[in-house]
Amino acid sequence: MNALILENLCNKGKEISQRELASRLGISLGKVNEKLRQLKNNGLIDQNYNVTKKGRQVLEANHPQRAIILAAGYGMRMVPINTEEPKGLLEVNQEPLIERLIKQLHKVGVYEIHVVVGFLKEHYEYLIDKYGVELIVNSHYDEYKNMYSLSLAKDYLFNSYILPCDVWFKENPFNRVEDQSYYLFSKQAVSNSIWRVQPRGGVRKVSAKQLGDRMVGLAYINSTDAASISQSLEYTQTNQELLHCFWETLLEQDKKFILRGRIISSDGFKEINSYEQLRDLDYSSNHLQNDAIKVIEETLRVTPKEIKNIRVLKKGMTNRSFFFEHGSDKYIMRIPGKGTDELINRHSEYEVYQTIKNTNWTEKVLYLNADNGYKLSKFIKSSHNCDANNPEQVQECMNLLRKLHNSVFKVSHRFDLYKQIDFYEELRGTTSAYRDYDEVKKRVEKLRPFIEKNAKRQVLCHIDANPDNFIFSKNQLYLIDWEYAGMQDPDIDIAMFAIYAMYDQQRVDDLIQTYYCNECDLVTKQKIYAYIAACGLLWSNWCEYKQSLGLDFGNYSIAQYRYAKEYSKKVLSYLGEPLNAQN
């Protein structure tokens, strides 16, 4: 507090009264007079309240030295903007958020700025030349929360501001003098905060049923507290569960908040966490002119202000989609995911949707672009995905597959299973991570003549017959997402359903009999096993390619390879073929 009073006295353009000091600093008049007496007694100001040489040395010692800006994350709630630009570079009043923060730091003499980047990191590179910042690359931005980002910058915590890249401050929140550490709160009561700032700046935990003050994300850390926080960050290297937390977790020690709280008015800042928040702050922002939003505007004939409750859906294996509302209706906008252009022929997908558009058992598509894959569809209300462990639901899914396979629908393209295996393998571009891949592939290749000899008539197949693509809504069952669909043997869809559901052999057999109403012959059953092996290898290669792009599918990828390995053995054994792939 002494340093802040010195700062105000040093920078006064005119005489400043004790009452004005009290108002600026948010303390009582009596407290101001007490502090002024202390400053005089310590030789920091003279009798005329002028700051002495000793006082200026105190000011210099309490001058913030640096800042750490955390800018690594995806910003998934910013859909659809986050597919094009990282959050820190979104523009408000034609100024990128992060540039405004950097300029505000410069105004108080803070020029050493470290920016932790990750998602779309290359977009921040220009800041090095324009503002002299240092970029710190977080390669695990998609795995950990900002605790890991701060740990990468822990050597710069001393006398440093810590702040997120996505907050817009109406007035400059930084100061030339900071004499103690603090964390910035707003007196907006929220459910996701357990802390409340007390009148004298202390921070107390609220009870389970109470709301806390909103945590803004900005903090100042002096040298004393930096040592403690830096030590805690080192501990995260041995307790990596902490890396999945926000860095503010470190501010609670022994059930107490270790920093003082400082308050900013709720209208003094805006956190830009969503398209709607950016729109409400700056309706003319260039980043609101987004291709996906334009499609929605033109298709539904609405203005951006009429698009409500935008939120990202669960990140899919192929696409990144978002949900929104207009009036009483709900919609899904699909934005093709990373590497999708290599995997999917969007013109073939367009042909399929044109072929089935008059059915009542697939999603209602309002817009589909055959060039870039953008798709706008009506959201199916009161719905849920098929539970692959529910026999009654699985029965209905197989009934719908039979209905599809017995339809008259035809398209001009065929899904060539073995050609696709080679194609995904080529996309992968490197040696497989599986040591016995070549042996397993040769076994799968040996199944090809058996499959082709016993293949049935070519019909329109979904190919991506994932239980998640079967949607139950009231008395209606839908089959959605026809990206991979093409002409094929209908038995391939049974195999696909089984391996997506990651069934064991008994459940695979049950599924086959469910589709065939307990009348499946042995040859057909073995052929479906062969499809399971080939499709497992297909999706295994698909997973390896996607992993090369930084995406990971957990147990799913290994499970697909196991299907290729184990079911190729089963079918070759049935055929009396040697299992040694060299023969």
Image: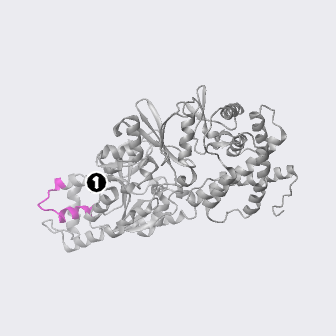
How packed mark 1 is, by other alpha carbons closer than 10 Å (few <14, some 14-19, many 20 or more), is: few
In the picture, the quarter occupied by the N terminus is bottom left
| Residue name at image x 65 percent, y 47 percent | 415
In the foreground, 11 or 36: 11
In the picture, the quarter occupied by the C terminus is bottom right
Magenta stretch mostly in which secondary structure? helix
| Residue name at image x 56 percent, y 47 percent | 316
Left-right relation of 402 to 336: right
* Image-quadrant location for residue 328: top left
Image coords of residue 69 (percent x, y): 39, 61
The residue segment tinted magenta is 1-20
- For residue 175, above or below residue 461: below
Q: Is residue 208 visible?
A: no
In the foreground, 414 or 98: 414
Image coords of residue 182 (percent x, y): 36, 58
Left-right relation of 453 to 245: right
What is the secondary structure assignment of the residue under circle 1?
Answer: loop
* Image-quadrant location for residue 238: bottom right
Badge 1 amino acid? Gln
Per the image, the residue denoted by label 1 is: 94
Image coords of residue 465 (percent x, y): 65, 41
Query: Does the magenta portion include 372?
Result: no
